[in-house]
Amino acid sequence: GRISCTSLQAAMRRAGQNPTDIEVLDIINRIDDDTGYLDFQEFCYIMQDLNKDLDMETGYKETFRVFSKDEEGCIPAEEIKFVLMHLPGKITYKEIDEMINTVDKNQDGKISYSEFRVMLGAVPLLIPDNPLSTNQEMAKEKEVVNSEKP
């Protein structure tokens, strides 16, 4: 079977992805051999490649949940130190401290999920470490704007 390049986005959505127009064009430019169609094997390759990234993210989340025991959804730096010191291999306290200081961007002594991902080698997320406070701030701003309306 073949999938026309114009039908690729719809086929990807039926397969569980939600690509943007730009992402679809990028895929077509990388894969299409000027026939205007992708064969089933090429489509499977695309979907496998996209799911690989999703699978890594799931792994990061599951690993983070194992260590995150506090109510804020963070891992205390001391917990990370304890785990790293008990792994096989030679890692020093100094190396662990350097790693935590590098990853703990806000220097609060806790590792947030976004910081944890970076520690595992993932690309940094562009989300606030405490989205709840951001939502609360937006709600307050909305109240101020609404109270200023006549």
Image: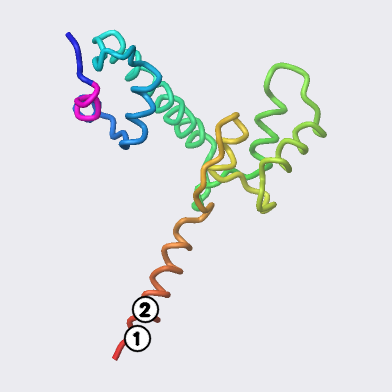
| Foreground pick, 34 / 3 | 34
Question: Which quadrant would residue 24 be assigned to in this image?
Answer: top left
The answer to whether residue 11 is left or right of residue 124 is left
- For residue 14, above or below residue 138: above
Q: Position of residue 7 (x, y in %)?
A: 19, 25
Q: Which quadrant is the N terminus positioned in?
A: top left
Taking the spot 56% from the left edge, 39% from the top edge, the residue there is 124
Q: Give the range drawn in magenta.
A: 5-10
| Foreground pick, 9 / 73 | 9
* The magenta stretch spans residue 67: no
Taking the spot 68% from the left edge, 41% from the top edge, the residue there is 78
- For residue 111, above or below residue 117: below
Q: Assign the magenta stretch its main secondary structure.
A: helix
Labels 2 and 1 touching (C-beta < 8 A): yes
| Foreground pick, 116 / 41 | 41
Taking the spot 45% from the left edge, 31% from the top edge, the residue there is 57
Q: Mark 1 points at which residue?
A: 147
In the image as oriented, which residue stretches furthest toward the bottom?
A: 150
Taking the spot 51% from the left edge, 55% from the top edge, the residue there is 130
